[in-house]
Amino acid sequence: MPMPQTSILEHLAEEEAILTNSHFIYTSGMHGTAYINMRAVAHDAGWFENVVGPLLGRAIDEYQPDIIVGPETLGRTIAQVTAPWLGADAVWCDMEVAGEKLASFSPKLDFGRLIRGKKVAIVDDLLTTGSSIKLVSDLIVATGGEVVAAAVVARRSPNVTEAECNVPVLKVLVDVEGFEVFTPEECLDHGPCSKEVPVVLRPGHGHAWIKDHPDYPVAS
């Protein structure tokens, strides 16, 4: 039997996947003082297969998706462990974050041929602003599929809903409270940038951000 949903946060804490009191850059370009490093549990195949997959499967079962799509990197794993619980197929898409952020299906795999005319659900590990799921949703619609739901393991902000993700239904296993999130302008005005709190290069996208801010202090 899968563990209760409340135990997801306990497991992440045990694996030191919840980081606080620092300065992080998220995929969206937003700044924050905490980070959920799901890559710290990426090795735990049993946890994904026996906990994450069944819970997400239950959450979206009523929408009867034919295809489960997960954005790289961990979305791919999550799609593959969720799909069997639904009798669905699992595919994944690439996410380009250098320069303009966009979602695309690899031409080599040609997953688009499977999407056309099918009901599709999107799964992912984290939800911060909803931009990644929105890009995947737009990709599915452009490919000829119907997005019926999206589901994520953890959401950093309860204010991010279906509207921001451009999906009809959004299911969340756990909400993580206590995250301070800032736009770049807010960060300079009253966030960690205003106090020159050293930026963490990894995890997160500090390693990319620092290229445009070479004089900013870096966390050791």
Image (tube, helix red, strand yellow):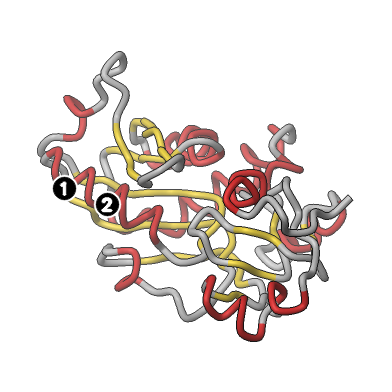
Note whether 194 is above or below 66 in the view shown. below
Note whether 157 is above or below 204 in the view shown. below
Whether residue 117 is visible to the viewer of this picture, yes or no, is yes
Front one among 117 and 204: 204
Amino acid type at circle 2 is: Ser
92 relative position to 51: left or right: left
91 relative position to 196: left or right: left
Horizontal and vertical percent for residue 184? 54, 71
Judged from the image, the secondary structure of the residue bearing numbered disc 1 is helix
Note whether 93 is above or below 212 in the view shown. above
Horizontal and vertical percent for residue 100? 36, 46
Specify few, some or many for label 2: CA neighbours under 10 Å numbering under 14, 14-19, or 20 or more: many
Front one among 31 and 217: 217
63 relative position to 218: left or right: left
Residue under label 2, please give it.
137
Front one among 184 and 85: 184
193 relative position to 121: left or right: right
**Which residue lies most toward the top here?**
108
Whether residue 1 is visible to the viewer of this picture, yes or no, is no
Residue under label 1, please give it.
141
Say whether marks 2 and 1 touch (CB < 8 Å): yes
CA–CA distance in space, label 2 to label 1: 6 Å
Front one among 133 and 215: 215
Q: Residue at x 52, y 77 (%)?
A: 185
Amino acid type at circle 1 is: Val
Judged from the image, the secondary structure of the residue bearing numbered disc 2 is helix
